[in-house]
Image (cartoon, rainbow, N blue to C red):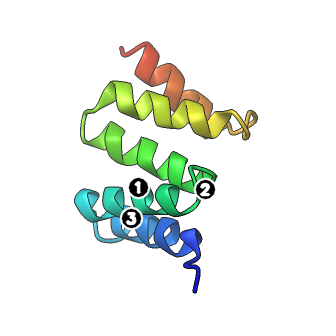
């Protein structure tokens, strides 16, 4: 039976913004990406958030940019990339 990667990306968002559990959210986003062969875009965005909150700027930037390859009009992600590239 094939596991739906979206289960992990959805739970990753729950862990991140409801429970503030960065470790479990990162683990779930990475699992969603593994199961989807890196195709779960919401997992890329979530991973970007987790890594940004953990202070892992380069990895966070890479995750957001991967997400933006397909979601070029996401103003929030664009703003986060700009903020990471040009911190005040």
Q: Which residue is mark 1?
A: 30
Q: Residue at x 42, y 62 (%)?
A: 31
Image coordinates of residue 50 in percent, x first then y, are 35, 48
Residue at 52%, 76% (x, y): give it. Answer: 7
Q: Residue at x 61, y 56 (%)?
A: 40
Q: What's the residue at 43%, 48% (across, down)?
A: 47
Q: Is residue 11 above or below residue 79?
A: below
Looking at the image, is 66 positioned above or below residue 32?
above
Question: Would you name the residue on which mark 3 appears?
Answer: 28
Q: Quadrant of residue 21?
A: bottom left
- Picture quarter containing residue 26? bottom left
Secondary structure found at label 1: helix
First in sequence, mark 2 or 1: give its number.
Answer: 1
Along the viewing direction, whichever of 74 and 28 lies nearer the viewer:
28
Q: Which mark is residue 40?
A: 2
Graded by Cα atoms within 10 Å as few (under 14), some (14 to 19) or many (20 or more), the crowding at tag 3 reads many
């Amino acid at each position: 039976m094939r596991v739906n990667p979206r289960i992990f990306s959805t739970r990753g968002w729950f862990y991140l913004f409801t429970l503030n559990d960065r470790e479990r959210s990162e683990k779930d986003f990475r699992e969603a990406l593994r199961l989807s062969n890196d195709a779960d875009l919401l997992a890329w965005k979530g991973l970007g958030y987790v890594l940004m909150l953990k202070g892992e700027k380069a990895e966070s930037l890479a995750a957001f940019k991967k997400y933006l390859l397909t979601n070029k009009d996401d103003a929030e992600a664009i703003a986060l990339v700009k903020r990471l590239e040009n911190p005040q």
